[in-house]
Structure formats: C-alpha cells, structure tokens
C-alpha cells in the first residue's frame, strides 16, 4: 500500500525537477486551519522532530509540501537545494525560515510559491502533506490589506482539486460551528468525501467539559468523522520537551480521561497518522486510473509532435537529406492543393487565398480594371469629332471616314495594356503569398526555407517578365489589324440604324437578370432613418433593391440604374468607421434617393467593395472618369469650337463612329478577358507548378552546402528538447504507474451524514455545540416515549462493547420495563407484546 504514496512522491519530484509543465493534480493532504490551531504541531508529531518555525502571529507564510518517507536513516532534503542532505532538524527549520524570507521578506509577507521538503525517517509512514498559512483577519507588517482574501485564495488553490484530501484542524477550546477550516472545506467538498476533522488542544478545555460528542461524530457530524490529538503546550516547546515523551503523555491523557478512555485506541497522533496513510493510499488508488488516462492522452498528443524527433540526430547527414526530401514533397503537395483547391480540413475559412483569389482576379478584378480605363463618353465623342474633321481637312466630308474609326479604336486598344499588366502583377503577388504560406512548415530550418523561397520567387519573376511580353504581344496583335469582318461586329449599316433608333427612343435594351445579392450598409442615412445598419441588397441589370433581411419579404426601396455612375468615398479624418465606402450618383446632379444626391454604400473589406463594383459594371454602371485639366486657354478654345459645331451631318457621323467603336471594343475586351487568364495560367502558374515538381530539388542541391542549409534554428532545437523531455517524463510516469498492483485492500467510504450545519450553524442555535464553560448534557435515555418497547440493538462494530465508565452525577441509565438491576442480559430481538 505504501508503494502508492512513494510513486506519487516520485511523480511530483520528476515533474518538478524536470521543469515539465504537466497539468496533473497529484493526490495529497492539505492541512487547513486558523492561526495557532496546532497545524504545525500535528506535522511535527508525525515526524517526531522539531523542524517547523515557531512564533506568534502568522508563522507559516508559504505553502510547505512535506513528503514523509519511511527510510533507514533520518534526514531531510529540499527541492531547491538539490543533492544537499540536512541531518539536523534545526538546520531544516533555519532553511525554511531563510527560504520564506527570500521570497516574502522578513516582515510577515506571504506568497503562494511552495517549499518542497522531503523527510526520510524510520519513525514515519509514507505521507504527503501541505502545510498552509493559517487564516487571519487583520493585516500586519508588509501584509496586504486583503490578507484574509489572499490566504483563502491560496488555500482554495490546493483544496479545490478533487485529488486533495482536506485535514481540517480546529482547537477544542473554540466553538466548532465557527470553524474556518470546516467552512472552507464545506465550500469545495459539500458531500464531505475528502474532509477529515482533527480536534486539537483537548487538554485545554475548561474543567467539567469535554468533546466526546464531537469525537463520537454525534454533534456536528462529518462523513469521515473527527480524530482528537493533544499537542505540546508553548511551555513544553520552550522547555524543549521531547516529542516522544509528548506522545506518551498524549496516550496517558486519553487512557486516563473518563470521557475518552473507551475510544483511546481511535485517538492520538499515531492513530491519525495511520488513518491519513490509509485514506491517502485509498485516495491515490482511486485516482490513479484517472491519472493514468490523463497521462496516456497527453502522451498520445505528444507522440504526434515528437514522431519526427524520436530518432533525430543533429549530425546525421542521411536524416537531414530525408527530412529535406520530405519537406520538398510536402511543399509540392501544399502548392498544388492551394492553387487547384482541396476539400481538406485545412481550408482557410477566413478569407480568399490561393487559387480562389487568383480566380477572382481573373474574372472580377480584370474586368473592373478594363472598365476603369474606358474614356469618358463626352471626351470620347469630342475625340471622334476632332478625328473626323481633321481627316476631312479643308474639304467638307460627305461620308464617314474609316480612318477616324481606326484611330479611335487603336487608342482604346492601347489603353488595355495597363489593366492587363496590373492583372499579371496581382497574380504574381498572390503566388508569392502562396509560396510563403507553403514554406511555413520549413520554419524549423530557416536557411532551407529562405533558399527555397528565393529559388521559387526568382523563377516566378522570370516567368512574369516573359508573360508580360506575351500579353503585350496579344495587344499588339489587336493593334496590327482591325478585323471589321468579325461575326460580332455590327458593321456600318447597323451602326447607323442603332444611332437612329437610340435617338428616337432614348432608351437602352437590357435583360432584368439578377447579378448579385449580399449585405451592405447605407452610410449617409441617419440612425433614425434606418441607416448605419445592414440591408439585404439585390442587384439586377436594371435596378438595385434592398430588403430588411435575406427573406426578401419587406422591400425598402428599388432604385433604377439608368444614368447612374460609381465613385469612391474617402473617409474623413474624424470618421470612426473602418468600413470601405462607395457611392451611386447621377452625373446630371439630380437626386438619386429621396433628397440625397448620392447613395453611399459600404462593406467590411476592400475586396467586398471591389466585387460589388465589378457586379455594377455588369449592370452597366461605370465608375466616374477623372478628367485631367488642361491649359485653360486650350480648354476654352476647344469648348468654344465644340459648342459652335452644330453640323447635323457631323453629329450623325460621330454617332456612327461611336457605335462602331463600341461594337469593336466589346470584341477586343471579350477576347482580352478570355486570353489574358489563359496566358497567365500557362506561362506563370502551370510553369511554376512544373518547376516545383521537377527542378526545385536540383536547384537546392546546386545552391550550396546542404549541411548548412539543414541547420536547425535555436528555437526549434529548444522546442525539440522540451518536447522530448516531456515525452520521456510522461512515458516514465506511465511505466511507474503500470508497475503498481491495484489489488489492494481499502476501507469503504463512510455513508453520508447530515452536515447542513456547516453553512448555517451560526444561525441555528440547536445545531451549535455547548459552550466550553458549561456542563455537558448526558446522553438521552430510552424511556417514556418508547411505549414499553425494547431498545434497538446497538450497532455491530466487530469488537466487544466497552465498559461504561462511572461519571459524576450521572450513573447508569434507568432500565426499561422494571428490569432488575445488575448485569445486563444478552441482547434480544425486538418483539411486540
């Protein structure tokens, strides 16, 4: 049985000395009580030596974890003084005082940092106890004002654990219902499973009083009962009375006292020591399976992390080579999954990344950038007018010139170079992010990670240059030849008919298809008018509507999109909102929504705003064109010449060329939006995947010394050693526990008792014990109300009933039913008359 306590002591020392932070609540006994309740004297009686500090007021100012181990020789060891044996218990007391002052100071300060003391002696049983500071009410010296609260929290830190037995020490010369120790124990152990009561100072009770009812667990009962002890008095301590003599005097006191002689074998320090040893052993046996399960779970968690560390040798080149190959293979797999997508549990759920973000660049951002480069309608018509008139020269043109169409289209096509180059830059930027993310698993080898990122990034930059050349070549292809025979090109006749129809109707033909749905906030409405809260917006090709919620049952408003444009809204310096805002407005200055010139909409991120802008582009709502101001004189002359131009033939020619340019540019932009992603995919992304899969390893071998490249970082080496140390400690602990035979004899847990006196003992006078100064009431007798029935059988205890001692003023209780005096007859079964 004692081997169980030895095992727990080994576990405590192993985890503490290795510095391993294992969250294991090891079984132990905490000694709780008020100041001068006799806690330290009880511990000294266990050891049989004076070794704890003495004095007035608060003496125990740090928790003392005391491990008693039965051994041949007698000495002590401190965990903070490894390897040093203290054969003199006066030195042990001095070391406890010095270590306490080192942390708390010499002016009564307290600390919750424990002192670990192990005592070997042939006179002790294997026990692990924690001596805690006594409860106090008033702060003195350097103690904080809330000293009572701090000590309670320190005590709760230990006794709150389910694996901790509570030794509640209460002096017999105080009211038991006011015991702070029992009150604290009740708060954390309401069922009384872990609480053992200890009554001290029985020899100091007033004459004529005793604690028999308490020790017999009749008054204020506990589930595990009470054990009485008699410690040395302060006079005995100052007179250096030997503890063994004190134990003999304690035994004599219990045998000679008329109230305690019948239970003297269940009182005293030796009996308390045996009970604690038995209870702690049973407690450890009950908690070891849970302790083993907890260790096994932690070991399984550690095994996954230390699998690569188990056989690692820093100087083994073959292991480093194998590790490099495995990490390159992992990089290849991660890069492939990030670009192509995967259904694994490692999918990013916070934002778009990898292939999804590149897809968004291809199909939303590229379209948005192309539309942003489109010329303003007024500016475009003026350019067409100047081109037609300059081509005609001094003559009056009767026909619409082809050269004007070609000149305007070439200018429009040349503007496509900037958005397609920006698209390539965005894709390369995202690829760099993907590479950094995929090489994060190489952080253990910083030089390998740095070299891998450098090689891949250099290759991608080279492919970026080649891709830009090819894409610009596509634009040059479009500039080289105007294919006016394209099947989607409207031609001259259709352009004229379209301009005439537009002039007659003044409307455009659009389908009413739903383009996008989502949440946005209307920024320029006050809170009282429904602003600053999210609405559910539905964008179609003709209008934008918003509803109260996603059910689309309560429509707030529907805004037609005809003639509207987009503009960005910059947040002011004093604005507290971090949302990104854009606005819908009318170029002619009319109100867009009620009395507002513009409708300001906002989203959480820039990406959401850009996505909404791209959706508005599909609905024909284009961004505002930022016009560059030219020289004032030139602008005045041009506007004057434009205003003076009122030739209807020229206006028809401008409209025709405008329709032709619009038709041809739709073909070009459609081809560009289709070919640019294909070119980027082939020349950059697919090429990068092929490079990583086929050539990266060769470049790594050719870049330098592999042994230097595979050097661990200092953080990784420290973490590896820490993980291995935790793994070995956990494995050794499981091996120690596995060697224990659980086939041990245990004492059953006592049945529950009515202990509701603990929280309400002060309020209920019937449950309070008698005053120490008053006489003890005799036990109630069975007469009168029994109705002539025989008394119930006494409980079977397995030993003969003790003789009832003669007590003054009492005598034997009267016998029921007129039974003659003398010896009692043998007990009989109750029967009815």
Image (tube, rainbow, N blue to C red):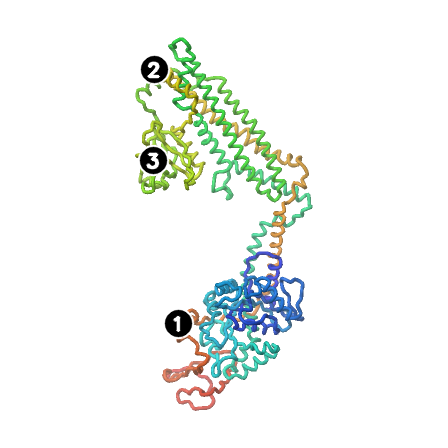
Real-space Cα distance between discs 3 and 2?
A: 41 Å
Residue 549 point in image, percent of width and height: 35, 41
Q: Which residue corresponds to mark 2?
A: 646
Between disc 2 and disc 1, whose residue precedes? 2
Q: Which residue corresponds to mark 3?
A: 545
Please give left or right for residue 105 compared with residue 386 in the image: right
> What quarter of the picture does the N terminus occupy?
bottom right
Residue 336 point in image, percent of width and height: 55, 37
The answer to whether marks 2 and 1 mark residues whose Cβ atoms lie closer than 8 Å is: no
Mark 2 crowd level (few <14, some 14–19, many ≥20, 10 Å Cα): few
As rendered, which of 193 and 741 lies closer to the eye? 193
Please give left or right for residue 175 compared with residue 450 in the image: left
Dot 3 lies on which element?
strand
Real-space Cα distance between discs 2 and 1?
A: 106 Å
On screen, 467 above or below 310?
Answer: above
Please give left or right for residue 551 compared with residue 115 in the image: left
As rendered, which of 286 and 713 lies closer to the eye? 713
| Total numbered badges shown on the rendered structure | 3
């Amino acid at each position: 049985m004692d081997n169980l306590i030895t095992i727990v002591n080994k576990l405590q020392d192993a985890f503490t000395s290795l510095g391993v932070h294992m969250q294991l609540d090891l079984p132990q006994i905490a000694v709780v009580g008020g100041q001068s309740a006799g806690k330290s004297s009880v511990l000294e009686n266990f050891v049989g030596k004076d070794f704890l500090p003495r004095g007035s007021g608060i003496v125990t100012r740090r928790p003392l974890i005391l491990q008693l181990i039965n051994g041949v020789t007698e000495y002590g060891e401190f965990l903070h003084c490894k390897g040093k044996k203290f054969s003199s218990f006066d030195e042990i007391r001095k070391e406890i005082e010095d270590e306490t002052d080192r942390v708390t100071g010499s002016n009564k300060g307290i600390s919750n940092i424990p002192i670990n003391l192990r005592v070997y002696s042939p006179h002790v049983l294997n026990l692990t106890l924690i001596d805690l500071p006594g409860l106090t009410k008033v702060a003195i010296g350097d103690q904080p004002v809330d000293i009572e609260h701090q000590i309670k929290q320190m005590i709760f830190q230990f006794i709150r654990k389910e694996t901790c037995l509570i030794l509640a020490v209460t002096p017999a010369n105080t009211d038991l219902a006011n015991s702070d120790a029992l009150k604290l124990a009740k708060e954390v152990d309401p069922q009384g499973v872990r609480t053992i009561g200890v009554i001290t100072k029985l020899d100091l009770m007033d004459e004529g009083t005793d604690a028999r009812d308490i020790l017999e667990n009749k008054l204020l009962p506990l589930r595990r009962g009470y054990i009485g002890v008699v410690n040395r008095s302060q006079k005995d301590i100052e007179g250096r009375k030997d503890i063994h003599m004190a134990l003999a005097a304690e035994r004599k006191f219990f045998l000679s006292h008329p109230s305690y002689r019948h239970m003297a074998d269940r009182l005293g320090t030796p009996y308390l020591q045996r009970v604690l040893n038995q209870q702690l052993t049973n407690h450890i046996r009950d908690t070891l399976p849970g302790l083993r399960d907890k260790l096994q779970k932690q070991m399984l968690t550690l095994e996954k992390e230390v699998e690569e560390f188990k056989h690692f040798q820093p100087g083994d080149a073959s292991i480093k080579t194998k590790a490099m190959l495995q990490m390159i293979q992992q990089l290849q797999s991660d890069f492939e999954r990030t670009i192509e997508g995967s259904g694994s549990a490692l999918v990013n759920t916070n934002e778009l990344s990898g292939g999804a973000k590149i897809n968004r660049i291809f199909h939303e951002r590229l379209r948005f950038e192309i539309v942003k480069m489109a010329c303003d309608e007024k500016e475009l018509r003026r350019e067409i007018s100047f081109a037609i008139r300059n081509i005609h020269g001094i003559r009056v043109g009767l026909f619409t010139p082809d050269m004007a169409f070609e000149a305007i289209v070439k200018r429009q096509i040349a503007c496509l170079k900037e958005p397609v180059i920006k698209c390539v830059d965005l894709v390369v930027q995202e690829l760099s992010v993907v590479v950094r993310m995929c090489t994060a698993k190489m952080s253990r080898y910083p030089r390998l990670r740095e070299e891998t990122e450098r090689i891949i990034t250099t290759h991608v930059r080279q492919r970026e240059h080649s891709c830009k050349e090819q894409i610009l070549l596509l634009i040059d292809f479009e500039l080289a030849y105007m294919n006016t025979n394209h099947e989607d090109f409207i031609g001259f006749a259709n352009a004229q008919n379209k301009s005439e129809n537009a002039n007659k109707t003044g409307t455009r033909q659009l389908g009413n298809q739903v383009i996008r749905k989502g949440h946005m906030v209307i920024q320029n409405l006050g809170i009282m008018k429904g602003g600053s809260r999210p609405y559910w917006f539905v964008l179609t090709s003709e209008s934008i509507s918003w509803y109260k919620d996603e059910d689309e049952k309560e429509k707030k408003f529907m805004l037609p999109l005809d003639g509207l444009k987009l503009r960005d809204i910059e947040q002011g310096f004093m604005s507290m909102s971090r949302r990104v805002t854009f606005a819908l407005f009318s170029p002619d200055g009319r109100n867009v929504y009620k009395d507002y010139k513009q409708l300001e909409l906002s989203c959480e991120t820039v990406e959401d705003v850009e996505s909404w802008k791209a959706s508005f582009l599909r609905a024909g709502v284009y961004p505002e064109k930022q016009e560059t101001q030219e020289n004032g004189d030139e602008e005045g002359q041009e506007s004057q010449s434009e205003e003076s131009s009122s030739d209807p033939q020229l206006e028809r020619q401008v409209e025709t060329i405008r329709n032709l340019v619009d038709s041809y540019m739709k073909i070009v932009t459609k081809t560009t939006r289709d070919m640019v992603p294909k070119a980027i995919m082939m020349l950059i992304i697919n090429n990068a995947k092929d490079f990583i899969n086929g050539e990266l390893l060769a470049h790594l071998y050719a870049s330098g010394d592999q042994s230097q490249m595979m050097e661990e970082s200092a953080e990784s080496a420290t973490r590896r050693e820490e993980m291995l140390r935790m793994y070995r400690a956990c494995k050794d602990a499981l091996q120690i526990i596995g060697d224990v035979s659980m086939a041990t004899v245990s004492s059953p847990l006592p049945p529950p008792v009515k202990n509701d006196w603990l929280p309400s003992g002060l309020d209920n006078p019937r449950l309070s014990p008698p005053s120490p100064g008053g006489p003890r009431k005799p036990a109630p007798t069975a007469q009168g109300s029994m109705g002539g029935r025989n008394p119930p059988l006494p409980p079977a205890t397995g030993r003969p009933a003790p003789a009832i001692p003669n007590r003054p003023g009492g005598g034997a209780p009267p016998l029921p039913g007129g039974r003659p005096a003398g010896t009692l007859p043998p007990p009989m079964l109750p029967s009815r008359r």
